[in-house]
Image: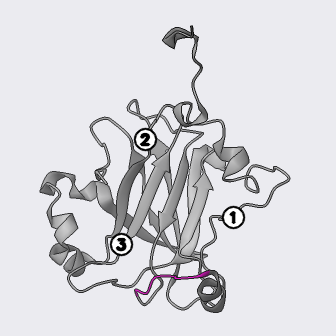
């Protein structure tokens, strides 16, 4: 008879060591092709080309070196990608994936276009999913943009977040030599904990 103490954890219960090999192999130098990368937009993609960067922090304020961040968004006009052929035609995938284990200071980065408004009454936003070692269920959050203050004020989802915590969902814009960049740090716990959504 097998007792509970003899059973081993399954991969879904040991979150962490499989990300690099299975989901971001190209980034980590494995001899496999990643289905999705941090580059969502090709040069021909319409819209404002931007870079999104940040770090994932634990409750003690330390950067997490083995997290995986995924983003999903509409294109620059607010339209979703509906097929592979659609993505190829637009030069835009609508979905990106990046680990935090290969870049300096354990940061992540995405090269995309600023999303358009997907529906009336919404502000432009990007859906974010975070997975990491020790996190048995991935978490969901959103990126809003600080230069969209008027639209942000009308967004029902953002308005449902307590006012004191809304800033954790707002990416900060800065201009760089390579173009516009948005900084979005993700705090898993602590005083600066990012707002996560129960989906």
The image's colouring method is one colour
- Number of numbered labels in the structure image: 3
Q: Which quarter of the rendering shows the N terminus?
A: top right
Q: Position of residue 105 (x, y in %)?
A: 59, 44
Asked where in the image residue 16 lies, by quadrant, the reply is top right
127 displayed left or right of 85: left
Q: Is residue 103 magenta?
A: no
Magenta span: predominant SS is: loop
Quick one: SS at disc 1? loop
Which residue is found at the position 66% from the left and 64% from the top?
Answer: 37
Task: Give the CA distance from mark 3 to mark 1.
Answer: 23 Å
Kindly identify which residue carries mark 3: 125
Q: Secondary structure at mark 2?
A: loop
Residue 145 image-quadrant placement: bottom left
Which label number is shown at residue 35? Answer: 1
Binning the other alpha carbons within 10 Å of mark 3 as few (below 14), some (14 to 19) or many (20 upward) gives many
- Which of the two discs, 2 and 1, labels the residue nearer the N terminus? 1
Mark 3 to mark 2: distance in Å? 23 Å
Using the rendered image of the protein, determine whether residue 102 is visible from the camera's viewpoint.
no
Span highlighted in magenta in the image: 78-83
Question: In the image, what residue occupies the spot 50% across and 45% down?
Answer: 131
Front label number (3 vs 1): 1
Q: Looking at the picture, tell me which residue is in the foreground, 1 or 182.
A: 1
Residue 127 located left or right of residue 102: left
The residue nearer to you, when weighing 6 against 43, is 6
Give percent across and percent down for residue 186: 41, 49
Residue wearing tag 2: 137
């Amino acid at each position: 008879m097998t007792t509970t103490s003899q059973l081993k954890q399954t991969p879904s219960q040991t979150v962490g060591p499989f990300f690099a090999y299975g989901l971001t192999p190209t980034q980590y130098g494995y001899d496999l092709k990643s289905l999705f990368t941090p580059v969502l937009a090709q040069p021909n993609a319409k819209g404002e080309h931007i870079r999104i960067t940040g770090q994932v922090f634990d409750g003690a304020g330390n950067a997490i070196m083995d997290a995986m961040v995924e983003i999903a968004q509409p294109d620059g006009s607010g339209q979703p990608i509906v097929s592979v052929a659609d993505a190829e035609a637009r030069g835009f995938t609508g979905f990106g994936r990046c680990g935090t284990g290969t870049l300096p200071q354990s940061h992540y980065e995405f090269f995309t276009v600023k999303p358009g408004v997907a529906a009336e009454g919404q502000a432009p936003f990007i859906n974010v999913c975070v997975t990491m070692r020790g996190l048995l269920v991935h978490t969901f959050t959103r990126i809003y943009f600080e230069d969209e203050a008027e639209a942000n004020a009308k967004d029902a989802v953002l308005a449902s977040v307590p006012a004191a915590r809304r800033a954790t969902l707002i990416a900060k814009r800065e201009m760089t030599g390579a173009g516009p960049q948005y900084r979005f740090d993700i705090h898993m716990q602590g005083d600066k904990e990012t707002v996560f959504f129960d989906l």
